[in-house]
Amino acid sequence: MSKTIFEKNSPGRKGYTLPQNDVDFSLNDCIPAEFQRKAEIRLPQVSELDVMRHFIELSHKNHFVEKGFYPLGSCTMKYNPKISDTLVNNSAFTQLHPFQPDADVQGSLKILWELQNYLAEIAGFGAVSLQPVAGAHGEFTGLKVIQYYHEAKGNQKTQIILPDSAHGTNPASASLCGYEIVEIASNDKGMVDLEALRAAVNEKTAGFMLTNPNTLGIFESQICEIAEIIHAVDGLMYMDGANFNAIMGIVKPGEIGFDVMHFNLHKSFSTPHGGGGPGSGPVGVRADLAKFLPSPQVAYSESRDYYLDDSHAATSMGKVQAFYGNFLVNVRAWFYFKMLGTEGVKRVSENAVINANYLMRKLEKYYYVPYNDNCMHEFVASGQWQKKEYGVHTIDIAKRLLDKGYHAPTIYFPLIVPEAIMIEPTETESMETLDDFIQAMIDIAEEAKTSPQTLHDAPLTTPIRRADDVRAVKELNTCFDLCLMPLTCDKE
Ligand SMILES: *Cc1c(COP(=O)(O)O)cnc(C)c1O
């Protein structure tokens, strides 16, 4: 067990040296006595090198994509080029004030305007809002557009339909908008069951939410029929675009029946994520729905150059975020478009798809793959064989992967596959990395046979062994106390 920084304390050791202060002034002179500390602050006394080593060591206890393969299905934990981080850290972006007059920030407004247009173009929509700051936030915004559309027409709509493979945020967002959720079963190909859909659709249907390719990594090829069924009752088609990285430059959702869609810039477009870092979930809509989008939009005209346009404020749902969303995340996406160009963006998707199919074909002899037609950018395997034959569960397989230096795939999602192991390699991984991972998965399948106890005991080499997954939620206070512990431990 490594030491806490407090245990590395060495009285008198410092991380800095400064010349003797020859100014007769103390900050304490400015702060009334009653607000001043009663006791000395207890901070660890360590050198700069101690601090560096301490935090570098801590960072390695975690997993990150620069350290190893991160095949977390649905989350697209690809390697994002560092150049985007470097560029957005330029003070021309970081030192802007959101209240600066339009005339002072023409360059930045132009970037936002172009990004709106790139996203609209690549997905086939009439307008895009950059305000939402997460995928789920985009869902909420997109569903509000649908709600405003129905209200404007006087439609009495109360239900949103979604398939049982949907991401949990879909029903949550619909419910937040006050809709009733109608869930329909998928067919034996893992796609929308048209009969079930027809049976669920009626005059109350406000819209249908669909991820395409869906969370099983399968392209919903009946999308045109689905859109027809929904549009026949004046419902709108919502696309969850979290999996857009499989079809960029290949399919335009706005041209195959979708009316509204969100993008996850932090999945597809170059923002590193995880741990709840900043995201961006822009929403694209059909041209006639643009008037309901959040206001203002970034606009351009010959006479005004780039400016913030709130001319649709009267019909807009209003703001969903301060200013224009997560500016720097949006700028990263703009750089990514500029760097890759039309062809490059398409190649991202092609390589993501080919990597996933390679993994699936190599692993399907060892792990059950319930829907094994060619997949898109990810596929869902299952630990069902290992469970039935050797009593080994998917959680054991996932924990054993940690010992081998990999982040585990997404497990137990989507809910319709028992013992699900959802693998998304992304386009940024080489064939050598994929081959090593395949070997690790094969070794684990072998271990399930020869020493299942090792899998039950895994992970064996990580800083902590198997964590109690739910304790952190159920005992908030305990966790809070644990976090604070180093601050209260008094070693001297
Ligand atoms: C990630 C994801 C979301 C939610 O996006 P967040 O940015 O995490 O809010 C929604 N749907 C699918 C399919 C996803 O993978």
Image (spheres, rainbow, N blue to C red):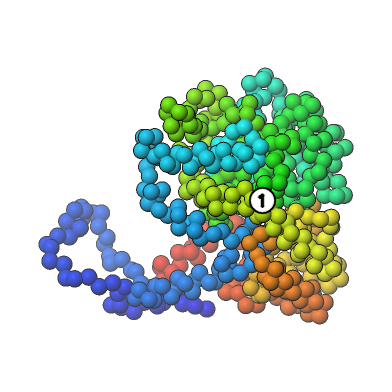
| 256 sits left or right of 1 in the view | right
Q: Residue at x 47, y 48 (%)?
A: 328
- Image quadrant in which the C terminus is located: bottom left
Looking at mark 1, is its residue's CB closer than 8 Å to ligand 1?
no
In depth, the one of 118 and 145 nearer the eye is 118
Residue 333: give x, y in percent of width and height. 54, 49
**Closest to the observer, 196 or 116:** 116
Residue 252 in percent (x, y) is at 69, 40
Which residue is nearer to you in this view: 466 or 234?
A: 234
* Most foreground residue, 221 or 446: 221
Tag count? 1
Callout 1: SS: helix
- What residue is shown at x 57% (from left), y 31% (from top)? 293
Residue 160 is drawn in which quadrant? top right
Location of mark 1 (residue): 346
Residue for point 64% across, 67% down: 69
